Image: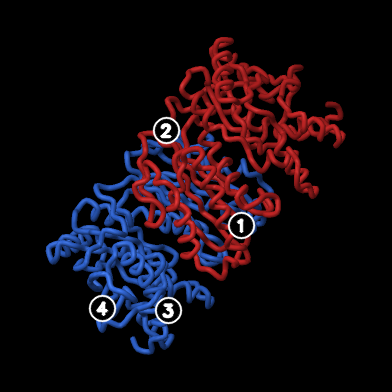
Chain colours: A blue, B red
């Protein structure tokens, strides 16, 4: 049945029923079904909102509704992870085209609920409207960890660390745009990593001085970090971690992998680590315990005039690093 | 300059600058500009999300961008009022068509910020995406009052009370659709009431047993109340408060005002009041102190089978009460 055949209230009831079928969540005093949710919160809450819009961030045939719901949760909660927080509650505002099958809306909500539940996060409210394209706007409410890790605490001398590998999702999008449907790179786009656990662990220590999630691309996000912290960065481009799949795909495209690694959509963590070698060792141990790969890709320096982010040869690396995509060599 | 000429980051910077120009808000530990906001919260937070979508909830020429921003805040925060809470923080997720003048986006944010500030509420975060139509999705984070007023606490014998007058906004939309641009009724649509103050006052007393905001229309919202509380309702239709402007307009349309009064968009409060005459007197006094009109429109009764909401002659009043619009007499 298409969305226009069924009212907003029936759709809300269907999603309410999905939530009601789950074990009652701790901390939810009033959940879906009243004017607003009433939630138990700590003294410092972390709140973020993020939207995925059809035709801009995804096409409906790129992923299943359940994958889309789960992806939306991972993308939105990534900002809570980046602050070192714990995601506790999520609200989902949907706009739905009138011709959209109602089963797809339900499966999308199911995918979101299941993925959120795996991170101990509960769907507590939302909104449904008709609209010309399918879009999901999520708000995640989290609890701050022992420390809040902003973008502004990094200092000269800190190491620059990233988790996981970069660029797979951006290459996956390129493959999807070219008609691809199955590959490891496409899987990376469909299912971004969840870094809530390692982020929470890092917030309990005192070695991380600044953290953000790699949503805009390494170049831009590192620029944000430098800007907020008043530092510069020197990056060893050869150290930027890329997967074998990406390396192969980039080679087949006659380009290098670094352009993909700086285009965004990675949702890995960009971390400034202080306390010298001892700090790095502790962060490496925390990552190992969480089963998360980490790589040191450079060092922060004093604020400089001009381009804040440079390579090992002191050459500026600009903006979105788009020119890197055209580097002929790997 | 149109939105497509300017990047997402520049737009975010422009809105950041608007927020930065305001006095620093209490409780905001980390505001716009980091991955997420870090907010001081109480042990019970009230959270709600709501969307206004161009072509569904508004047309851009119906109101100025500043009016639209303020309206969005009033519509979204109305759900916090309905729970008896205080709105503290708001997040704004925008989708913007590429041809939209950037000044309109800024003025819309300004309108929202100013109206929120008047309710001691701070814009603390958001998101900007391109999209086929303009849409605003707001999340309001509030603090619970002394009591949380849900939909489910009403009891047989409670009085049914509404604030303000009903139906002006729905008639205003009808006029806008017919090409009207200036009238009291259109003003009611453009600028819904803010009931946060009276709602907070009512939550401090113990006479209100249930409360919700009239967003879907008196018929539907009263049905929600009966459903959640397990009661029935008898409404004196002649008592439903309507403005002289609406009465005149409806007469000119050859219809009665009640159809408009049950179509929604009012954002007044629907209140169940217990403790008999003494309870009603105290609620009336609180409303008078807040400068808010209130009217008793009926009484709640025991749960009955069949239609839960009936008129004074025990005739069922169905769903959205759309048939009332066709009542020939006033």
Q: In the rendered view, does A321 fall on the left or right side of B165?
A: left
Give neighbour class at mark 4: few <14, some 14-19, many 20+ (Cα, 10 Å): some
Q: Are marks 4 and 2 in contact (CB under 8 Å)?
A: no
Q: Position of residue A327 (x, y in %)?
A: 38, 86
State which tag comes first along the sequence, 2 or 3.
2
Q: Are marks 1 and 3 in contact (CB under 8 Å)?
A: no
Number of the label disc, if any, that sits on residue A154: none
Residue located at (37% from left, 45% from top): B28
Looking at the rendered structure, the secondary structure element under dot 1 is loop
Chain assignment, label 1: B
Residue placed under numbered mark 4 in the picture: A236
- Can the viewer see residue A113 in this picture? no
In the image, residue A259 sits, relative to residue B87, either above or below, namely: below
Number of the label disc, if any, that sits on residue A29: 2
Give neighbour class at mark 3: few <14, some 14-19, many 20+ (Cα, 10 Å): some
Residue placed under numbered mark 3 in the picture: A322
Residue placed under numbered mark 1 in the picture: B134
Circles 4 and 3 on the same subunit: yes
Looking at the rendered structure, the secondary structure element under dot 3 is helix
Residue located at (55% from left, 21% from top): B289
Q: Position of residue A320 (x, y in %)?
A: 41, 74
Chain assignment, label 3: A
Task: Residue lying at the far left in this picture: please name it.
Answer: A278
In the image, residue A141 sits, relative to residue B200, either above or below, namely: below
Q: CA distance from mark 1 to mark 3?
A: 29 Å
Task: Residue lying at the far top in this picture: please name it.
Answer: B277
Q: Nearer the viewer, residue A51 or A61?
A: A51
State which tag comes first along the sequence, 4 or 3.
4
Residue located at (67% from left, 30% from top): B218
> Foreground mark, 1 or 2?
1
Q: Position of residue A310 (x, y in %)?
A: 30, 78
Chain assignment, label 2: A
């Amino acid at each position: 049945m298409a969305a226009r055949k069924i009212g907003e209230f029936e759709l809300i009831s269907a999603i309410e029923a999905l939530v009601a079928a789950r074990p009652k969540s701790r901390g939810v005093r009033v959940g879906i079904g009243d004017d607003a949710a009433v939630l138990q919160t700590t003294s410092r809450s972390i709140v973020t909102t993020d939207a995925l819009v059809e035709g801009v961030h995804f096409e409906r045939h790129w992923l299943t509704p359940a994958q889309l719901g789960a992806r939306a949760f991972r993308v939105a909660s990534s900002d809570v992870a980046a602050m070192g927080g714990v995601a506790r509650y999520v609200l989902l505002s949907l706009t739905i085209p009138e011709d959209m099958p109602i089963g797809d809306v339900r499966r999308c909500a199911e995918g979101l609920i299941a993925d959120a539940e795996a991170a101990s996060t509960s769907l507590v409210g939302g909104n449904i409207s008709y609209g010309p394209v399918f879009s999901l706007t999520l708000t995640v409410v989290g609890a701050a960890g022992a420390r809040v890790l902003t973008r502004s605490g990094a200092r000269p001398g800190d190491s620059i660390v990233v988790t996981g590998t970069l660029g797979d999702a951006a290459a996956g999008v390129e493959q999807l745009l070219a008609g691809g449907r199955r590959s490891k790179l496409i899987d990376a786009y469909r299912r971004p990593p969840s870094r809530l656990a390692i982020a929470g662990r890092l917030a309990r220590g005192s070695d991380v001085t600044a953290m953000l999630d790699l949503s805009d691309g390494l170049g831009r996000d590192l620029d944000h970090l430098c800007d907020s912290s008043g530092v510069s960065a020197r990056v060893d481009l050869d150290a930027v971690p890329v997967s074998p799949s990406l390396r192969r795909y980039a080679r087949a495209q006659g380009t290098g992998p670094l352009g993909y690694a700086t285009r965004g959509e990675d949702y890995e963590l960009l971390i400034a680590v202080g306390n010298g070698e001892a700090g790095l060792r502790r962060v490496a141990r925390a990552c190992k315990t969480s089963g998360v790969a980490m790589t040191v890709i450079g060092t922060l320096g004093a604020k400089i005039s001009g381009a804040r982010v440079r390579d090992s040869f002191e050459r500026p690396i600009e903006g979105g690093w788009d020119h890197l995509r055209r580097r002929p060599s790997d």
